[in-house]
Amino acid sequence: MMNTEGGLQSQKFVKGTQHMSFYLETEIKKKGGKIFYNSFVNKIVQNKNEVSVSTRNGVTYNANYLIIAAPPTITKKIHF
């Protein structure tokens, strides 16, 4: 095994990686942002000012920012 001292492989999250997700959720909600879970996205369109996200059930959301928390096998099904 090669030496990884000082590299990212030797770094760990004190409270685990899921804590980062919980922290991000808290900060987004504190600032008035919304998080939508279990929304199957089929299209994302981004321009200079905003991003539009369309879901399978026909709802479109517009936002300043978008975080995709899905593995590549899922995101490859989204039309960008």
Image (cartoon, rainbow, N blue to C red):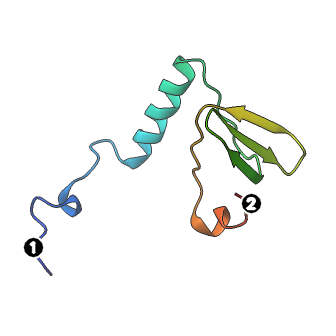
Q: Which residue is drawn at the image coordinates 53% and 26% (left, top)?
A: 28
Local packing at callout 1 (Cα closer than 10 Å; few below 14, some 14-19, many 20+) is few
Q: Which residue is situated farthest in the bottom direction here? A: 1
What's the amino acid at mark 1?
A: Asn
Which of the pair 13/73 is nearer the observer?
A: 73
Q: Which residue is drawn at the image coordinates 35% and 47% (left, top)?
A: 16
Instruction: Give the percent coordinates (x, y) of residue 57.
Output: 89, 47
Q: Which residue is drawn at the image coordinates 59% and 49% (left, top)?
A: 68
Q: Which residue is situated farthest in the right direction here? A: 58
Q: Quick check: 52 left or right of 49? A: right
The mark lying in front, picked from 2 and 1, is 2
| Residue 4 vertical position relative to residue 65 in the rendered view, above or below | below
| Residue 43 vertical position relative to residue 51 in the rendered view, above or below | below
**Lower position in the chain sequence, tag 2 or tag 1:** 1
Local packing at callout 2 (Cα closer than 10 Å; few below 14, some 14-19, many 20+) is few
Quadrant location of residue 6? bottom left
Give SS at disc 2. Answer: loop
Q: How many marks?
A: 2
Give SS at disc 1. Answer: loop
| Residue 3 vertical position relative to residue 59 in the rendered view, above or below | below
- For residue 30, which numbered disc appears in the image? none
Q: Quick check: 71 left or right of 23? A: right
What's the amino acid at mark 2?
A: His
Instruction: Give the percent coordinates (x, y) of residue 7.
Output: 16, 61
Q: Quadrant of the N terminus?
A: bottom left
Q: Which residue is drawn at the image coordinates 74% and 43% (left, top)?
A: 53
Which residue is disc 2 drawn over?
Answer: 79
Real-space Cα separation, disc 2 to disc 1, in angstroms: 41 Å
| Residue 51 vertical position relative to residue 45 in the rendered view, above or below | above
Instruction: Give the percent coordinates (x, y) of residue 73.
Output: 63, 69
Which residue is disc 1 drawn over?
Answer: 3
Q: Quadrant of the C terminus?
A: bottom right
